[in-house]
Image (cartoon, helix red, strand yellow):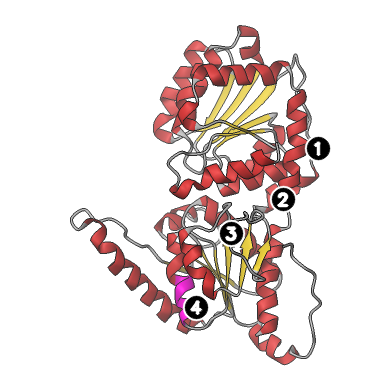
Amino acid sequence: MNIKDQSCGTSRANASNIDALRPIVLSSGGTGGHLFPALSVADEIEASGRTALLVTDNRGVLFFKNHKKKPALVCTIHRKHWLFGRLVYPFSLSFQILKCFIWLKKVKPAAVIGFGGYPSFPCTYAAQWLKIPTVLHEGNAFLGKANRTLAPKAKRIGLSFPPSESTIIDERYYVTGNPVRSGIRELISETYQSPDIKGDFQLLLIGGSQGAKIFSQLLPQAVQKLSPKLQKRLVITQQCREPLLNDTQLAYGEQTNCRVELKTFLSPIENYYKKAHLVIARAGASTVAEVSIAGKPTLLVPFQGSIEGDQAQNAAQLMAGNAVWVMREASLNPDKLAVFLKEKMEKPESLTEKATLIRTFAHPKAAQNVWKLVKDILEES
């Protein structure tokens, strides 16, 4: 199931020269979990001399507000309406498919890569309708609804994790890993440094692109239950939603002796990974890929409201390899979290063990692997 090396033939040289002028379209959902992998592959495409065009929704437009790359097409599907509810969804979806159909006819891409999420569906579906070769990438431990629907007509399908025994696969499926940003890829060469039992303990909390409300509620309470000596050792960097910043800061500042830095967005995030002794995070696809490459001991708290339980399944993959700790959101409480932190701060041996094991799930060349899938189908056509 790994990417295989294949030498490029010369018999199609003229066709390849013509084809190289046509862009590659990357269609992605509007969250960081979909956009970061798409951007990573776009970088690989453009490094090869091709043009990469991104398609996403309105959330993606906000994401790219301060980014050098802008979406070539905005494809927003309305799934709810203040008056008509979900009745508007099929009409909105149909309109976006038609819009993508017209745009693709004009752009004439050599291939389209779908990265999952419902906003990725119209462009990838329209491409298949137009007989444009498509490649899918799935960041989670199982195919999401959009990718499941598109899979029968896809030329190649890249997976972030080895398929489960219940997954029906064929020769089109490859384990590529989940592409991450270039700065994070470079962390693969970093060696984990365990904390000194009397020194600072760097704790990094990541709640996805919007921060996690549960961490803002539970962590200050958990820290309050630690001894003053342990509190003074704690250096906490926490991603926090903007509306919760003041309350969270007060919860830490008034009743704890730890040092805390709250941020709505961690950028560049690789700098925060570098100094972390322990990461506490959700189990989104990008986060799991990042901590694996960074080689950081991690406590995963899967979001219990995630669609189809994708975060729980992502966490289960790493837990099966004894590479992370996992706590269910429903059973997590300040007492349980305090006991966990105390143990890791006083006996850091297990941190080093987890740092080694989590690296076995790292795929630093995932973006190259996905791009290779596309190049393979272009050589075949």
Report the disc number at residue 232.
none
Amino acid type at image mark 1:
Thr
Q: Position of residue 175 (x, y in %)?
A: 68, 60
Please tell me which of labels 4 and 3 falls first in the chain: 4
Question: Quick one: label 4, few (<14), some, or many (20+) residues within 10 Å?
Answer: some
Instruction: Note whether residue 46 is visible.
Output: no
Q: Quarter of the image holding residue 294? A: top right
What residue does disc 2 label?
185
Report the disc number at residue 128.
4
| In this view, 199 is above or below 286 | above
Asked whether the residues under the numbered discs 3 and 1 touch, taking CB atoms below 8 Å apart as contact, a structural biologist would say no
Discs 4/3, front: 3
Please tell me which of labels 3 and 1 falls first in the chain: 3
Q: Is residue 125 magenta?
A: yes
Q: Is residue 85 magenta?
A: no
Q: Nearer the viewer, residue 105 or 281?
A: 281
Task: Give the distance between the C-alpha atoms of the residues marked 3 and 1, in whole angstroms.
Answer: 35 Å
Please tell me which of labels 2 and 4 falls first in the chain: 4
Amino acid type at image mark 2:
Arg
Task: Give the distance between the C-alpha atoms of the residues marked 4 and 3, in whole angstroms.
Answer: 23 Å
Asked whether the residues under the numbered discs 1 and 2 touch, taking CB atoms below 8 Å apart as contact, a structural biologist would say no
Read off the magenta span: 123-129
What residue is drawn where x is 80% and y is 87%? 10
What residue does disc 3 label?
167
Q: In which quadrant of the rendered image does the N terminus lie?
A: bottom right
What residue does disc 1 label?
191
Q: In which quadrant of the rendered image does the C terminus lie?
A: bottom right
Asked whether the residues under the numbered discs 4 and 3 touch, taking CB atoms below 8 Å apart as contact, a structural biologist would say no
Please tell me which of labels 1 and 2 falls first in the chain: 2
Task: Give the distance between the C-alpha atoms of the residues marked 1 and 4, in whole angstroms.
Answer: 44 Å
Secondary element at image label 4: helix
Asked whether the residues under the numbered discs 1 and 4 touch, taking CB atoms below 8 Å apart as contact, a structural biologist would say no
